[in-house]
Image (cartoon, rainbow, N blue to C red):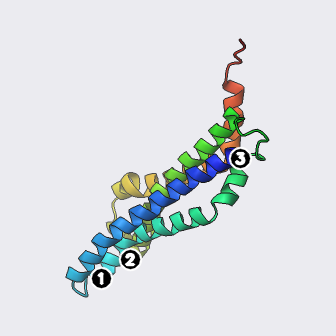
Amino acid sequence: MTQSITIVLVRLFAAYCMLTAFSHSWQIMAMVQQASSDNLAALAGANLPWVTMGILGALLWWFSLAVARWVSDSPTALEGEVSADDIVAAGSFVIGLYWVVDALPQAIGLTISLFQSAPYLGAVSNSFYVMHFMPAWAQAIIGLLIMVGCRNLARLFRSMRPNVTD
């Protein structure tokens, strides 16, 4: 049952990613029709985060069963038996996944724009790094660490949880 909960959570999040990307693609297509040929490269860069989010959503949907097997232990024998550790592992994986999908398109777009302006790096102020570049990559890395360490977070939760006996 825990694997089915994880599959549903991951697929709901994948559907959210794909629908968000799809809704923004309509706005970008309307802007492309109104833009001149000089602005098309800028619009392609503006569309990159949403394309990345759509691709990540499709990959999540496709690999949701493998993700569920990785996050949760073996399927439980009883349908009503779901341990708190499995819920914590599945929930922390989805939270880390949200952080990654939220930050990764922005971080990739900022990195590409930084390398496009490489000859002008002296003109880029330090506030750009502090306000945009570093927080985006930090959020993506922390999200990846939460995703990879979801079972360890469940173990930490188990060790901190008080033993309540009735």
Quarter placement of the N terminus: top right
In the shown orientation, is residue 120 left or right of residue 145?
left
State which tag comes first along the sequence, 3 or 2: 3
User: What residue occupies the far bottom of the structure in this picture?
Assistant: 37
Q: Position of residue 92 (x, y in %)?
A: 59, 43
Q: What is the spatial separation of the Cα atoms under label 3 and label 2, in whole angstroms?
A: 48 Å
Q: Which amino acid, mark 3?
A: Ser
Q: What is the spatial separation of the Cα atoms under label 2 and label 1, in whole angstroms?
A: 22 Å
Name the residue beneath numbered marker 1: 40
Please tell me whether residue 62 is drawn above or below residue 102 in the rendered image.
below
Q: Is residue 44 visible?
A: yes
Please tell me whether residue 71 is drawn above or below residue 112 in the rendered image.
above
The residue mark sitting in front, 3 or 1, is 3
Name the mark on residue 50: none
Q: Position of residue 115 (x, y in %)?
A: 44, 73
Name the mark on residue 119: 2
